[in-house]
Amino acid sequence: MAPSSKNKNAWRTQFRSVRRSWSSEAYRARSSLIGHRVLSLPAVTTARVVHVYWALQERGEIDTRLIIAALRQRSAKVVLPVVQSFDSDTPTLEHRRYEGPSALATNRWGIAEPTGTERVPPQALDIVLVPALGADHSGQRLGHGSGYYDAFLASVTCPRIALVYEDCVVPSLPTAPHDVPMTTLVTEQNVLDVCN
């Protein structure tokens, strides 16, 4: 199948295969490089309220613990997503302050989420760090396909930064009307400002 004719699921399969090909040492090294690049971004160094995802390391998601620890050390408020409306066609996200690993519970999809902590409205966020299986040169991001980031990303005006492996950035991905492009892609090798 030619790359331009792949559908989203074919791209997801390809990107997951890339992740599975790495050793645990390569995974940690790549995550660390991306984490340090993220922390050096001017928008991140000045942000006071930052939405970050808690990585599913078993899926090869870029480990965000380094980023979270550094942001907290800088006294930034770290906000993690909490999946709501599991039974609807499109789950939604709520945003809660992260107060440490002891205040996390695992949801039905295995994602660690804050419990009983302060809710933070999307309008209060200074920056959003988003997981991505892959992305393209125009800033389109490909996630796991659950859809819960789509409505959230459409509701924010702050910078949207996708953390993505260099091997998973391609010239073009298929898009849908609800897809929201990222403003920046951060990989092990590059910071790509793609959309304002």
Image: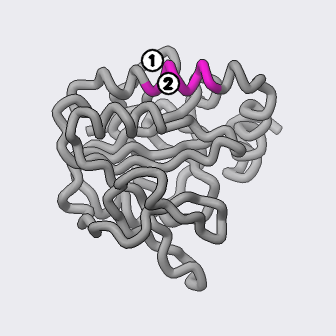
- In the shown orientation, is residue 131 left or right of residue 20? left
Residue annotated with mark 1: 190
How crowded pointer 2 is (Cα within 10 Å; few <14, some 14-19, many 20+) is rated as many
Q: Residues within 10 Å of mark 1 (few under 14, many from 20)?
A: few
Q: Is residue 183 magenta?
A: no
Instruction: State the quadrant of the C terminus.
Output: top left
- Distance from disc 1 to disc 2, alpha carbons, whole Å, reads 5 Å
* Segment tinted magenta in the rendering: 28-35
Q: Is 109 displayed left or right of 51 in the figure?
A: right
Q: Residue furthest bottom?
A: 87
Secondary structure mainly formed by the magenta segment: helix
In the image as oriented, which residue stretches furthest toward the top? 189
Q: Are marks 1 and 2 in contact (CB under 8 Å)?
A: yes
User: At which x and y percent is residue 24?
Assistant: 73, 26
| Residue ID at (44%, 35%) | 138
**Residue 11 image position (x, y, % from top left):** 71, 43
* Residue nearest the viewer, comparing 96 with 100: 100
> Which residue is depicted at the point 40% across and 51% down?
100
- Picture residue at 62% right of the left edge, 30% below the top: 168
Residue under label 2 = 187
